[in-house]
Structures are given as C-alpha cells and as structure tokens.
Image (cartoon, rainbow, N blue to C red):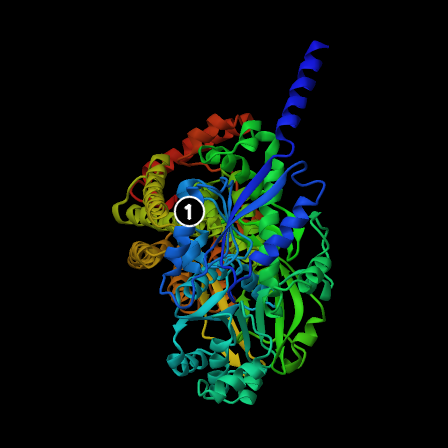
Amino acid sequence: MEVFSSIALLLGLYLRVTVGADIYFGMLTPIGTPDEQMYGPVQLALNDINNHPDVLSGHTLRLVIKNTSVPANESVYHVGNAVAKLQELMTPKTDPPVMLLLHHGSVTETDVIGEITGKLKMIQVATGSSSFTLSQRLVFPYLYRTIGSLLDVITIEVDFVKRFGWTRVALLAEDKGSYKEMSKEVETLLRQSGIEIITSIFYRVEQLGQVMEKLKELDARVILHHASGQGSPLCHVFCQAYKYGLFGKKYVWLTLMQNVKDYRNLASSMHQKGKLSCNAEQVVQAAEGQFIIFRADAKHASEVGYEPKRPFTVKDPAEILREMKEQAWYNDDTRRILYQLNYDAIWAAALALNKSLPRLPPRIITNFKYTDLGTVTDALVPEMNRTNFFGASGPVSFSPHGSRMSWLSMEQIRNGTATLFGIYDQKSRNMTLSEKISLLWYIHGGVIPQSGYRTVRTLLVVADELKIAFTVLAVISIVITVVFLLVTIVKWKTQLIQNSWPLMNSVIALGCIFLAVNVILQGSATQLSSTSHIPCNAFVWLFVTGFTLSFGTMLLKMWGVYRLFRYQQDWGLQVELRMLSGVAVLLVIDILMLIIWQLTDPLVVKDRLLPESRDGAKMVRYQTLYRQCHSGSAMGWAIAFIVYKGLLLLVSVCLVWPTWVMSMKRDAGDSSQVGLAMVIIALATVVGVPVGVLVQEEPNVNFGVIAGFTLFAIIATVLLLLIPKLIALKRGEMEPSLWSPLRPYIEELFDDVGDKKPSRAIENGDANTSDNNQGDGSAAQI
C-alpha cells in the first residue's frame, strides 16, 4: 500500500511540475517577402496544436522565429544571413532555448543549415528543398522534410513503366545536378527490373536538336524526362519533338515534378518574348496526351476516388484549406501545396514530441537548456521515423532518408492543360487511376503503345513425333541387346558361345545399352533447362563410354583374332581377359579425359540466337533460339576425342579387312560378323558426326541424324551377333562344348553331374584327334 502511495505522490509531483510548462521550437523563415510561405501556415497550425486536447496536453507550444529575409536594397548573401540568424537563435540573450528547428529556405540554405544542425545534434524539419543531396543521412542525420526528395519520387517511373508493360525506355535529363542524379538513380532501378535503357542523355536547350535526332535514330518510343518544374524546359523539349516528329501515337513522354497547369499560355508567353522558336499551337500539339507528375494533396486524392484508411488526422484537409484561404497571407493558389507542407511540418514535430514526453525527465521539460539537446533529440528521432498522420497535404511519413513519403498526382496534358487522372502513393507504391486505361491512350487508338518492337521468341525443340519414334527404336534395341545377353549367359557352356568370346560379347552389349539409353535421355528432354547443366554432361559420359565399351571391345576382339591367325597363339580365358584389360585401359583414358574436362570447364546450357526477322506493320521482332550444351573449351575437347576415337577407327580399318578375310576362310566364331559390325559403325561415325555438327541449329535434324546413326549401328551390331546364334539354337547345334578354354571354370560354377561322364569319354577321343592335328587346332576353335 505504501508503494502505491509513493507512486501516486511522485506522479502528482511530476504533473504539478510539468503541467503548464511552455515548450519552444525555433523557426528560420523569410517574413514579409514574396517567399513568405511558412510563417502564416505554421502560425495557423500552432493554434490548432495548442487547442487539440490530445497533443502536448497541459503544455503550450511556442515559436522563437528568426526572419531570414534580406532587404532588396542590401547586398547580403542570404545563406550567410540564415547562418547568422541560427547563431543568434542558439546563443540566446532574451529568447528561450528551442528543442528543434523549423526551416524554410533555398536548396543551398537548407544544405548549409542542415550540416550545422547535424553537428549540433538538433532535429531540423525543412520544407523548402527537394534536392537529392539532402538525403545523405551521414551528412544530414537529423534533417526531415515534409517535401518529397527528388531521389524518392523516381519509384513512380519504375512502376509506371511496369504498369504498362514496356521493356525499353530512353532517359532524358536537364544537365543540372539534381536532374542528372534522378536520371542515374532511375536507370539503376529500371535495369534491376530488367528494363532495357536504350540511351541516357543529359542536355542543354541548345543541344535539343541533336538529342532528338539520336532518339529518333535509336527508335525511342518511351522517354522518361527529368527537368525543372517551372515548365519552360518542357516547352523547349516539346518544341523540338514537334520539329523532329517525336510525338503522336508512337511516342510516350513522362516528365517528373512539373508544377505547371496551362502549357498553352506558358508556350505563348515564351514565344512572344523570343525565348521559344515554336508557337503555342505547335507545343500543344506535341504535348497532347503526354504525362507529367507532381506532388498531390488530399484534394487530388478525393478527385480520383483514392481514400485509404487514415491514421491520426489533425483536421479535415478541406477545412484546413478553407481556413487558409480566409487568411490575408493566402494570396496565391499556385502555392497551395507549399502552404500545406509548411502546415504539416510543425504538426510532424509536435506529434513526435508528444509521444516522446513520457521518456523525458521533468527537469528537461520545465527547464530545458541546450546542454539537454542531445537527450531530447535521442528521444525524438525514433518518433520522427515512425511519423504517420494525415495532415493538410495528405498522409505524412518519412523515408529512411528523412524525406516525405506522400502522394504524387499523375496528370495528362490535354489541349494544353494538365488534367489529373491518377494518384500514386509513394509509401505503398499503389497507383490509382480515375478512368479506364483505354481512355488514357485516346491518341493511340485506345491501345497501350509499344516501347518498340515487341519481341516474340521461339525456342526450337525436337518434335514430339521424332522423340517418340526414336525412343521406341532405342527401347527395341535395348530389348534385342538384353536377348543377346540372355542367350550368351544361358548357353555360356556351349562351344558356339565359347568360340565367340562371351565375356567380350557381354561388354559389347553393355556399351550398346549405354548408347541406347543416351538416345532415350536426349529425346526425353523436350528442352534443356537453362539452370540445370547435369544432362549435358551425362550425355557426353554415356556416349563416350558407350562407344569405347562397344567399338573398343570389338576392335580388341578382332586384334585377338588377328594374332591367333597370324601367330598361331593358343586361346584361353587368360588371353580373353588380357584383351579386356586393353578395353579397361581405353575406358580409363576416357574417364580421365572426362574428369579433367568436368573439373576445368564443364558443359553448361547456353541459348543461341538465330538471325531475327521483323514485321514492321505489327511492330514485332521474331527471334528464334536453340539451346545447346556449351563450354569455352568444348571445341578443343571435341577435337581431342575425335582424334583419339579417329585413331581407333583408323586402326580398325587396317585390322578388320585382313582379319575378316582370314575368318571367312576358317571357322572363327563370330569374328566375321564383328568385322561387318565394325565397318557399319565406322561408316555411321564418319557420316553422322560431321552432319550432326553442321546442323546444330536444327534440333530435329541434329537429333534425328545422331540418334538415327547411333541406333542403326547398335541394332545392326546386336543382330549380326545374335541372329547366327539363334539360327544355331534352332538347328540344335548349340550343344555343350567338348573343347573349351572356359570348360574348367564352367565346371566349377555349374555342377552338371549328368554331363561329366560322357564328356570325359569324348574328351579322350578328342584329345587323340587333337594330337594328330596339332598346329591348326587352336585356330579352328574360336
């Protein structure tokens, strides 16, 4: 109970000490001059703040105002005068110290004052400059602006381009700091969004003729323009656009931050003064249907029907505007938005302070000193960053740069007058249009104009019918190969199978299966993925190893037959295994080459463009591309494999014919069929490889040639090896072998008791026969 009493006592003391304390803000602004745009609106807002029950309750907000205007008859640098007034404010003799600064001044003045307040650690709320340089947070850490930065408004250009589906734009900017930076920033954002920037030009008025020539030469259709908001640069641009024909239904101009409504009168005035070479009608004709952007307020939003959910509302914007118009200082309706921005400036500061008061010690509130400025600023900064209220100019919040995030009005020039057609919310990046999109493009026939030739891309792929046909053939070839393997395994002990070297035949069959699977995989890939490179490398591995296992084994098999005939060597399992070890060497060479290739420069999927065609009437550019496996060193590796495999083919040509002739004269297993298969493979390779390389741009022909020759070679090889054995099987000639180099090993694996006794008896008889026919017995049993 005593604890609660103590808390209540402390709270009472706090309220008694703080209630009624005056709080002071400083203000630097010109007074009594045409540039006076802050004093009146801030005084009106100050009265509303002090009368609001929920804002700074129990306190009175007051202003310490320093007039920064310079008399016309005095030669005083206005920035120096503003700095002197700030120094006067910060070294008070009679004025109370202030917690933050409200400021309205030029770009240069805001820049200098902002650097000083940054070093003093004082919050500055400015209203007079939208320069992008003030968004540098390291230089201006405590600067906030109720006017938007030129750096932050450019997102509307990106969203405008995206909204209407344009893919290429040109950038044009006055050769001045702020506008050049705007152009550079929007170029970065557009490139990040995948938009093509065909050119980015900084111009002076006297250079506009050359600029228009370049835009026409580059076929620029959508031009984003950054220029002074006073309208005269835009009149010069439309004058030159008229002369060079860059207007009408083919062209779209979007110009940022133009605070001009009547371009007919402006152009007429400039022409009469000799400042514009075109008359008003020519400028109006070129400007017809083009777009401009400027800051919007609540009135603009209501006109297009944009009424989002409002946060804290200081007062109805229409009521505030009505009260402003009743004031003596409201004498220029073109400055309405600036009046509203200044009104909202003090509200932003007051609301931030209102939320910060509970965190400030009572002594600071009642007896603030400049030594307490850091504490106050530390409490205010988070609340300024979280600012979110609805003021005279619409929603007020700040970007990370400290500049205003609000609404932008989207206007279209119609008959020389800027007409509102939409609102862009910077914070949500929401674009609201007051009319149908087709109505915006009335000079374009109600259709969104193109940003240039529309590109239609076609990806060349293998036809489904072709893939299905070759896949079926590949499956058939695999089935035939499996049948060949089964016949070899089941009849392994027969003399016919033993004489045809079953181990080597099995390796040949395995290589054929690899090649057939490669054809199926290539056919099943409708189109190679642009991100996955595994299929490319898998194709190479299957083809290279499959070729070596099949053709390499047949080559060494013929080499063995040749040595048997030439040197009358004995034949046995050891000799066959020695031939297979040669196949293993060839395979190891392949694998080592492939591994080195994979590690140094693997194959990747790459798109290749064929020459494009254009349809000028439809503004369509037709591009055809095909997707292929590629690497920087692919040609070198291809040559290496071609040379390597070519040597094998060359050896086979020199070896096959004499061996084939010998085998035809004598019974030498299936060597004659193997020789014919090697001839077929060599011819298929010699014809198929060059044709496949030459027609890479035609996927159907490329796949058809390579797959066709591959499957033809596979099926021919397997049938040549299989059919004679099936014929022998049908005739009953495939009986267990009486003399076979594999017989001792087979008898160990198969315990065929019934065959042993007669086999030994016959074997003895054969042995006698063998003794009588030594010299050619070995050669006959292959």
Q: Quadrant of residue 351?
A: top right
Characterize the local packing of mark 1: few (<14), some (14-19) or many (20 or more) Cα atoms within 10 angstroms.
Answer: few
Q: Name above or below for residue 313 compared with residue 176.
A: above
Q: Is residue 119 left or right of residue 517?
A: left
Asked whether residue 169 is in view, the answer is yes
Which corner quadrant holds the N terminus?
top right
What kind of residue is marked 1? Answer: Glu
Q: Name above or below for residue 781 compared with residue 379.
A: below
Asked whether residue 550 is in view, the answer is no
Q: Residue at x 54, y 75 (%)?
A: 253
Residue 225 on image: x %, y %: 49, 71
Nearer the observer, 621 or 637: 621
Q: Residue at x 60, y 60 (%)?
A: 339
Residue 361 on image: x %, y %: 56, 27
Residue farthest toward the top in the current orientation of the protein: 2
Q: Name above or below for residue 627 compared with residue 235.
A: above
Q: Name above or below for residue 679 compared with residue 123.
A: below
**Which element is circle 1 on?**
helix
- According to the picture, the residue beneath numbered tag 1 turns out to be 88
Which corner quadrant holds the C terminus?
top left
Residue 272 on image: x %, y %: 49, 89
Nearer the observer, 299 or 649: 299
Q: Residue at x 52, y 85 (%)?
A: 269
Please state the total of marks drawn on the protein image: 1
Residue farthest toward the left in the current orientation of the protein: 567
Residue 296 on image: x %, y %: 62, 63
Nearer the observer, 461 or 737: 461
